[in-house]
Image (cartoon, rainbow, N blue to C red):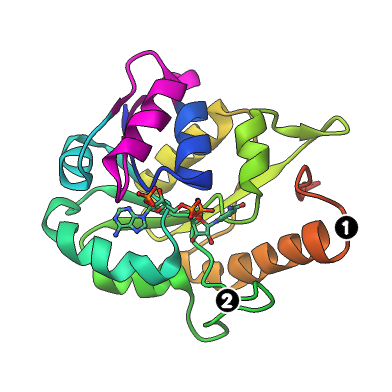
């Protein structure tokens, strides 16, 4: 299974490296190809770097890991390549000071992204956990497995994302349809408030007890 990352920063690099360790063939891409190459080197194994277009063309699953403000331009450029592909949206549409979201309640970043690439199967995931957790490759805090929520409208695509989450060792929690991103994105804001504002740091995560 080939995973392409669009973005090789905090999220693209850390999830891509972990996915590679979990058995995925990973192709990193970024604005600056040097950053993608650095991530590929960190992942080792079969991981490689490519342009955004070449990475997406070769992928089964695409992880969108760019700032929300950059998503429209990037996706417009690759719209033709995304038909039928799984597109994981990890973004949070944060205000500049990280104290709020720039959209919500009646829509979400994930739903706005799905409007840009209507033929892709968008799955919201990975947005409620800090990149530092992904970089640590430790899915547990104090023995509790962190929940990674995923939401989308296509059953098969959700199953592929759930498999990735589970292979990384997280508790994959189905949060329903893509519209559930309206609640998952504010959850990320709460995570940021707890981690930074309230001093719990970035080695934290929600768990889901059922
Ligand atoms: N950081 C977290 O803890 C965290 C947690 C959950 C969700 N998120 C969300 O994940 C997303 C990424 O955050 P991040 O912290 O990983 O950001 P980041 O470290 O700033 O990385 C952003 C990446 O996007 C790439 N990029 C920007 N514009 C691009 C374009 N037009 N084409 C291709 N690549 C482009 C950048 O390329 P270059 O490397 O070449 O600059 C960089 O690799 C954001 O939406 C954020 O809200 C972040």
Compared across the picture, whether 138 is left or right of 67 comes to right
- Residue 199, labelled with which disc? 1
Q: Residue at x 88, y 63 (%)?
A: 198
Residue bounds of the magenta highlight:
20-48
Residue that protrudes farthest toward the bottom in the picture: 106
Q: In the rendered image, which quarter is residue 192 located in?
A: bottom right
Callouts 1 and 2 close, C-beta under 8 Å: no
Looking at the rendering, the quadrant in which ligand 1 lies is: bottom left
| Image location (x, y in percent) of residue 179 | 49, 71
Work out whether mark 1 precedes mark 2 in sequence or the reverse, and give the earlier one.
2
**Residue where numbered disc 2 is placed:** 96
Question: Measured along the vertical axis of the image, is residue 144 above or below residue 158?
Answer: above
Question: Measured along the vertical axis of the image, is residue 58 above or below residue 177?
Answer: above
Question: Measured along the vertical axis of the image, is residue 204 above or below residue 154?
Answer: above
| Image location (x, y in percent) of residue 148 | 62, 46
Residue that protrudes farthest toward the left in the picture: 80
């Amino acid at each position: 299974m080939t995973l392409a990352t669009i973005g090789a920063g905090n999220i693209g690099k850390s999830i891509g490296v972990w996915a590679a360790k979990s058995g995925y063939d990973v192709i990193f891409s970024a604005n600056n190809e040097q950053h993608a190459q650095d991530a590929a080197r960190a992942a080792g194994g079969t991981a490689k770097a490519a342009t955004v277009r070449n990475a997406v063309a070769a992928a089964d699953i695409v992880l969108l890991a760019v700032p929300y403000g950059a998503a429209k331009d990037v996706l417009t450029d690759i719209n033709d390549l995304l038909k039928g592909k799984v597109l994981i949206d990890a973004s949070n549409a944060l205000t500049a000071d990280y104290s709020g979201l720039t959209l919500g309640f009646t829509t979400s970043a994930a739903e706005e992204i799905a409007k840009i690439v209507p033929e892709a199967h968008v799955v919201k995931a990975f947005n409620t956990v800090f990149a530092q957790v992904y970089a640590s490759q430790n899915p547990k805090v104090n023995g509790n497995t962190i929940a990674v929520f995923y939401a989308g409208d296509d059953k098969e695509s959700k199953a592929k994302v759930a498999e990735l989450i589970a292979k990384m060792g997280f508790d994959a929690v189905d949060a329903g349809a893509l519209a559930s991103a309206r609640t998952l994105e504010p959850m990320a804001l709460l995570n940021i408030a707890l981690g930074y504002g309230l001093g719990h740091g970035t080695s934290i995560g929600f768990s889901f007890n059922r």
